[in-house]
Image (cartoon, grey):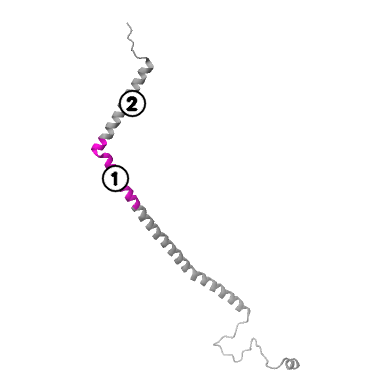
Amino acid sequence: MIVRSDLPLPLHWVVVALSLGFSAAIALWAFEFGKDIAGVDHKSKVELGRLGVEVAQLRSERDQAQAIVNATESLMRVEIVAKDRPTQQLRRIEAESLGLKVDLGFFPRPLPAGAATAGRPVRAMRSRSNRPARHAASCR
């Protein structure tokens, strides 16, 4: 003896699929209803709102701190430039001084200031005449 169902096989699969779908829908509804009764979903929404406010507050604090850091960096740059300026001026003045010393080395050294000049020859002398140029030419 062979037992056969009254429903054809494709229709049998449709009934099974509908039953499983209906069972899944009831299970999902029961799960969501249980969350609402327990208040789990409400707590997470409140927590999400609180965290959103906290994130906005932390971003505001970060922006303020970043503004302070930017101002501090700017002041540090100004201070570094202010420190370097006298150093650069000193180097420039030292270079000018060295150049003047080199130029001054070209001329003969003057007599020592503290030494007695009696009996010593004069190293160099320049004279300037107030006479007109034609008399100076005839005196030579």
Give residue 78's mark. none
Identify the residue shown where x is 36% and y is 20%.
14
Q: Secondary structure at mark 2?
A: helix
Depth check, mark 2 against mark 1: the one in front is 2
Identify the residue shown where x is 34% and y is 20%.
15
Residue range highlighted in magenta? 34-56
Identify the residue shown where x is 27% and y is 41%.
42
18 to the left or right of 70: left
- Amino acid under label 1? Glu
CA separation in Å, label 2 and label 1: 33 Å
Residue under numbered circle 1: 47
Q: Secondary structure at mark 1?
A: helix
Displayed quadrant of residue 9: top left
Residue under numbered circle 2: 21
Instruction: Please say whether residue 51 is one of the residues in the magenta stretch.
Output: yes
Q: How many marks?
A: 2
Q: Tell me the quadrant of the picture where the N terminus can be found.
A: top left
Most foreground residue, 130 or 139 = 130
6 to the left or right of 105: left
Q: Is residue 53 above or below residue 7?
A: below
**Among all residues in the image, which is located at the extreme right?**
138
* Majority SS type along the magenta span: helix
The picture places residue 12, in percent across and down from the top left corner, at 35, 17
| Tag 2 and tag 1, C-beta contact below 8 Å | no
Identify the residue shown where x is 37% and y is 55%.
62
Q: Is residue 64 above or below residue 114?
A: above
- Amino acid under label 2? Gly
The picture places residue 81, in percent across and down from the top left corner, at 48, 66
Q: Is residue 64 above or below residue 121?
A: above
Instruction: Please say whether residue 40 is one of the residues in the magenta stretch.
Output: yes
Most foreground residue, 9 or 130 = 9
Displayed quadrant of residue 7: top left
